[in-house]
Image: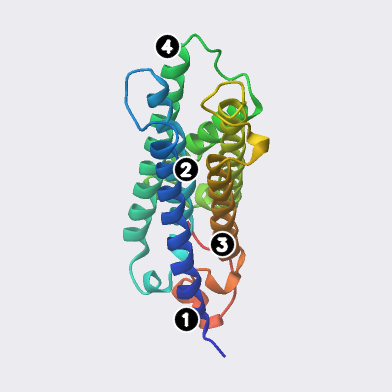
Amino acid sequence: MISSSVLFYGIYVLCLCLGLLCVVFVSYWNIEWRGGFAWDASFLQFNWHPVLMVTGLVVLYGNAAILYRIPFTWSQRKQHWKLVHASLLLSSLFLSILGLCAVFDFHTGYHIPNLYSLHSWVGICTVVLFTVQWVLGLVGFLSPCSPLGFRKLLKPVHAWMGMAIFILSLASSLSGINEKLLLALDGNSNSTAAYSSHPAEALFANFLGVLIVAFGLVVLGILSNQRWNRLEPEQESSRSLLPEDN
C-alpha cells in the first residue's frame, strides 16, 4: 500500500500544478482576449481584477491553508511555520485588496455602480471575512500576550472560518468569470461572438473555471483528511487524531 506521506506528496504536487495552471490561464485569458493590463482606470485596469483575485484569494490562500498538512513541517518548530502561514495569507489579502482597488477604480472612471451584483456581494463579504480572520489569527496565535483560554476558544472558529472563506473565494471567482463572459460576449458588436455560440474565449474561460473547481476540491480534500493533521508531540505518542493547532 502507498504510505500516507507518499500519497500526500502526490496530491500536493497535483495541487501546486493546478494552482499554477489557474494563474497561467487567468493571465493568458486577459492578455489574449481582453487586451492586457494597465493601471489607468480603463478596461485594461479591470483586467487586473480577475488575475489578482484568482492568484491571491484562491491559489495563495489555498496553499496557505494546507501548509500545516505538509509532513515535512511536522518535525520542525511550529512557530516558524505559523509565521510562514501568516505571511502567505497576508500576501493573499494584499493581492485581494489590490484586485478590489482595480475594479473600483475602473467603475469610478466609467461611472458604473459598485456592488450591485451577487458576485460583488459575495466577493466583498469574502474579503471582509478574510481581513477579520487574519487579524484574529494574528492576535490569537502569534501575539505572546494571547491567553491560552482565548486560543482554545478561537481554534475551532479559526479552522471553520478558514474553510468557509476558501469556499466563498471559489464561489466568487466562478461567478466573476461567468459574469465577465456574459457582459463581454453579448454578441451585439461585430468583434465579439455571443457566449452561447461557444467562441474560443468562452471555452478557455470556462476551462479556467473547471481548473479552479479542481484546485478547490484538492485543497478541501487535503483539509478534510485527518491523517494529514499535524500532531503535537504529546498527541503523537497516543496517535490520537485531533484538529491541528493553529
Depth check, front residue: 188 or 224? 188
Q: Please name the residue that numbered disc 1 is placed on.
A: 6
Q: Is residue 104 above or below residue 138?
A: above
- In the displayed structure, would residue 52 be above or below residue 113? below
Secondary structure beneath dot 4 equals helix
* Residue in the picture at 59% in, 76% down: 240
Label 3 neighbour load within 10 Å: few <14, some 14-19, many 20+: some
Query: How far across and down, in percent of the image, does residue 127 sit?
Result: 51, 34
Near-viewer residue (8 or 142): 8
Task: Check contact, mark 3 vs mark 2: CB within 8 A.
Answer: no
Q: Which residue is drawn at 57% across and 74% down?
A: 227
Q: At 45% across and 74% down in the image, what residue appears? A: 9
Q: In which quarter of the image is residue 218?
A: bottom right
The image quarter in which residue 26 lies: top left
Identity, as a three-letter code, of the amino acid under mark 1: Val
Is disc 4 surrounded by few (<14), some (14 to 19) or many (20+) residues within 10 Å? few
Type of the residue with mark 4: Gly
Q: Residue furthest top?
A: 111
Chain-order first, disc 3 or disc 2:
2
> Disc 4 designates what residue?
109
